[in-house]
Image (spheres, helix red, strand yellow):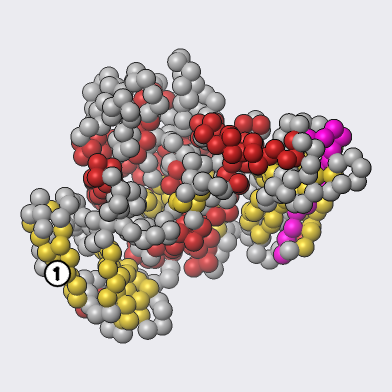
Amino acid sequence: MKLWRSRWCRAALLPTLVGATAVAGPLARADIGTELPLIIDVSTPAAGQCDGALHGTTAVYFPPGVPAHADVEWRILGGGQPIRTGITPVNSDVVTVGFDIRQDELPADGRLRVDARARVPGGAVGGYGKPWNLRVSRECRPLHVVSAGDSVTWGQGLGLDRTFADLTAETLGTQTGRTARLHDYSVSGAALDAPALHADTEDADCPVDAKTTDESGTDRLPDVFCQLEQAGTEARAGGYPVDLVLLDGCINDLDPLFGIPVGLTPGTKDVTAAVRRECGGAGAEADNPAAHVPYFSGAKLGYGGRGMRAAIEKAHALPGSPKVLVSNYFHGEDAPDAPEALRARWSEFIRVSAETFRQAAEQANTAAGEVYAVAADGLVSQGNGDHGPWMNPLGDEEVSLRLLACPHIEAPPQCRTAAVSHADVDGAREFAKTFLLNPAVREWFGGGGPSGSGFTVSKTTGPAGTTVEFDGAPAGGAIRQYDWYFGDGAHATTDGPEVAHAYRDPGPNLPRLVVTDMTGRRAMYELQEPIVIG
């Protein structure tokens, strides 16, 4: 499995360093803290897991200033019981320990927990610090899922085994009765396409980590096309087919949303035009207007590149001709209490990008003569409280600690829980489940499609304020709950099949309906074309 380090490990360090030092401070004064030592990386290469011992390494962070001659006592647990333990002298800020675990020692669910504690001269022993949880597969023919994209697929703020991509793979494996193995190449901050990385040929000069810089010293983050190229290289080398690709991207190509104190990034003032250019690959001027802005912007790298259709087709060209699930961005910043300028721009972005992704998947399917790609949605709506992919990290010691530890290791897979925000695992789990409700995904991997024919609408166009009537009767009988997602961030739950909704913001808005029958089984339907307002 190849994972790239994120630039956010360094970028997010400064604003949280004070809090991290405060947490680490007691240990630096020769006391034993309860949060340290900290596991910051566990590496378990996929090769040979199904029929041999599990070989791996774990990296343990000890901050500068710990007592001299201290030791790290580490352990690996399965099913709550220690499988491997050891005591290793501290000879640097990061201590790397190797381990081997026989197949018969691994727990049935494959879940492992790694943590460590400090032992200092005089016999004092601290408590075990923050753990690292992971899951390994023992199946020789698992589903292989590739994740490529930016921070949404990367799972910014979540532990390694709790990311959106991991939970999607896990849930898919459960539905199919097979183990699913995730190969994660996504990077927080990555562009969909950074043309400068491919100056000579389509896949030339792809950087393999965030340390690669251009002439000005600016980080050159791997884009989605580079991620897919690496996924193909490793799949061919490992001799395995890819079954599904989770894909997103292009938000960092245009950087239009939050604004910069000195002004918006050039080329993104018209959000719709920017989305069509960067997400849709509609083309742009040869010179990037954001190339020399005096602040960081993803648009410095991603401007005028290939769009999502080209990424979908490249994903499908991986060994095994996998299915492709393009994950739409989610509502949340367009909540009613958000600043109006931010709400309007974010709302416009997610609607236009969702429609661009849908069209890209449709075009790719038409060109191939088969349905292998779909633009799916996590159904995150306005005002749904904590159940979104992210939560506020303020006061979260784990985030601060991992941010502090991140720069001390040369090449971790990613600073997995070093993030500008801390994630809500329940929200991420629900996010994953709703993606797999998509009718195309259920048809590809089993679980059955919806039994009915969907829902009808009274109209698909109109001016702002147009009320559209929805009828879910075609979804079938014996339905106990109808959950309507209107495509504009609004959500309604009814116990009957009819509902009306007034559209005020511009479209396109693609409605979806999730029905729950009397046994608790859920099915999802979506309109074939979006509702366009204005």
What is the magenta range?
66-79
Relative image position of residue 138 (x, y in whole percent)? 66, 59
Q: Is residue 262 above or below residue 309?
A: above
Q: Which residue is mark 1?
A: 469
- In this view, which residue lies farthest toward the top? 215
Residue nearer the viewer, 448 or 352: 352
Relative image position of residue 331 (x, y in whole percent)? 32, 53
Seen at 87% across and 34% down, the residue is 69
Q: Is residue 73 above or below residue 25?
A: below
Crowding at label 1, few (<14), some or many (≥20) Cα neighbours within 10 Å?
some
Relative image position of residue 367 (x, y in whole percent)? 27, 47
Seen at 79% across and 59% down, the residue is 82
In the picture, the quarter occupied by the N terminus is top right
Relative image position of residue 79 (x, y in whole percent)? 72, 64
Residue nearer the viewer, 276 or 291: 291
Seen at 90% across and 40% down, the residue is 121
User: Is there any visible trace of residue 448 in the rendered image?
Assistant: yes
- The secondary structure type at the circle numbered 1 is strand
Dividing the picture into quadrants, the one containing residue 527 is bottom left
Seen at 16% across and 69% down, the residue is 500
Amino acid type, callout 1: Glu
